[in-house]
Amino acid sequence: MDWLGSIVSINCGDSLGVYQGRVSAVDQVSQTISLTRPFHNGVKCLVPEVTFRAGDITELKILEIPGPGDNQQFGDLHQTDLGPSGVGYQMSISQNGTGKVVKKPASSSSAPQSIPKRPDVKSQDVAVSPQQQQCSKSYVDRHMESLSQSKSFRRRHNSWSSSSRHPNQATPKKSGLKNGQMKNKDDECFGDDIEEIPDTDFDFEGNLALFDKAAVFEEIDTYERRSGTRSRGVPSERPARYRHDENILESEPIVYRRITVPHSVSKEFCTEANGADSGLVVPSVSYELHKKLLSVAEKHGLTLERRLEMTGVCASQMALTLLGGPNRLNPKNVHQRPTVALLCGPHVKGAQGISCGRHLANHDVQVILFLPSFVKMLESITNELSLFSKTQGQQVSSLRDLPASPVDLVINCLDCPENAFLRDQPWYKAAVAWANQNRAPVLSIDPPVHEVEQGIDAKWSLALGLPLPLGEHAGRVYLCDIGIPQQVFQEVGINYHSPFGCKFVIPLHSA
């Protein structure tokens, strides 16, 4: 018995089907062969061993022959008189070790053929039919799957789960009991084998090229227009996309020039651009029209004290932003308090600067207020100084008391068109010289229109209500809302629509 342990496939016809397994016994007397761990039509049998009579076998194929190191033997198997019609089949093994199944009639007078012993299997290969070439040595590892499975039958892996396995069959383990159990569960859940695996990858690009997207959208658009439903439109007719801060609801066209003045405009500004918008146009007004606007506003109840308070709040808010905002002014940064120097003259613009200094001092800013000593002061200045004295701010009347080292910010409120003679006084020239030598950035509040040869060049300028035609010496121009009602603008001949939006201080750009 030289062929015990070989893996064979036995075809028993349409009634019994195909069995595969390893040869465990051959009985020459009773003409039977036994297979261990058998599979029936690709499904593992519930019994550990099956035995076949020679009369039931119509075809026998050797799938794998054990190596020379195995001591298992396979005896002679006579396969005559297998079929009911008297036609038999015999299996032969050539001398070079190659085997094949040969179907031929077996006469009743022919002697039983024996299978010769294989000389050497180590250096020889078993030549099988094309159907048999699909089976390799990995067949055992893959549970000896059937070679003759029909396409209408799919074996499910969990059809022979751990509950139907032979009691002596051990569960494979790789890295301990836990990993082996997890592997077993994974095999039962995800172990379905695929009958046919394509050799080439799916061509996604080629398949997508077959889809005419434009034609499909055109068909959808035609159908929706006929049915009266909302049209999505073809890709070329889709509406433009909106930003996250844009209103998707249709509205009236935007009018960018919503402020007009009764006289010719020497200079125009525009608000900060947002995305594709060019900004709202803000025209400049003459000093005379600006003065008339403030006078009419005061007649309607917007008094000087209210304007000073509003100007001080807006100017201090802008100054706090320039000083660093929350990054500079917070309880954890008390050792770096910003220092602001206020240069004020004895006029209304100086009172605006004092109001700004009071609000800055209330926000924990170190304020040094310079105001020259005069015998007669305006009532607005006296009231603002009285309030400023209640803060921690410092007031000086001599330039020698101003800091020699650079400060964080200089606020200029020295100039006033109605007090032009002050520019010829020594204290004014000395204050301008100190500001230019201190090398600190300068913020001018409500600067005048005219160019001053010995004036202070500002980095930022804050205009009130509507800007004046400021020159290059004014730096970056900002506009603040001091609370003038719209009817007051109309009374002086200005068609006005607020450009501030949600803010009280906005930047302006030269148009």
Image (cartoon, helix red, strand yellow):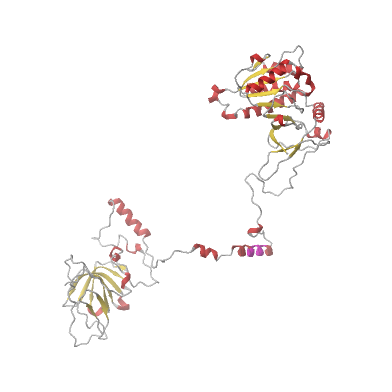
Q: Is residue 374 above or below residue 91?
A: above
Q: Which residues are magenta?
A: 218-224
Position of the N terminus, as image quadrant, is: bottom left
The spot of residue 275 in percent (x, y) is 66, 44
The spot of residue 183 in percent (x, y) is 32, 55
The answer to which image quadrant residue 121 occupies is bottom left
The spot of residue 391 in percent (x, y) is 64, 18
Position of the C terminus, as image quadrant, is: top right
The spot of residue 491 in percent (x, y) is 83, 33
Q: Is residue 267 above or below residue 131?
A: above
The answer to which image quadrant residue 361 occupies is top right
Q: Is residue 220 magenta?
A: yes
* Residue at 34% across, 64% down: 159
Q: In the image, is 493 to the left or to the right of 432? A: right
Q: Is residue 161 magenta?
A: no
Q: Is residue 146 visible?
A: no
Q: Is residue 468 above or below residue 200?
A: above
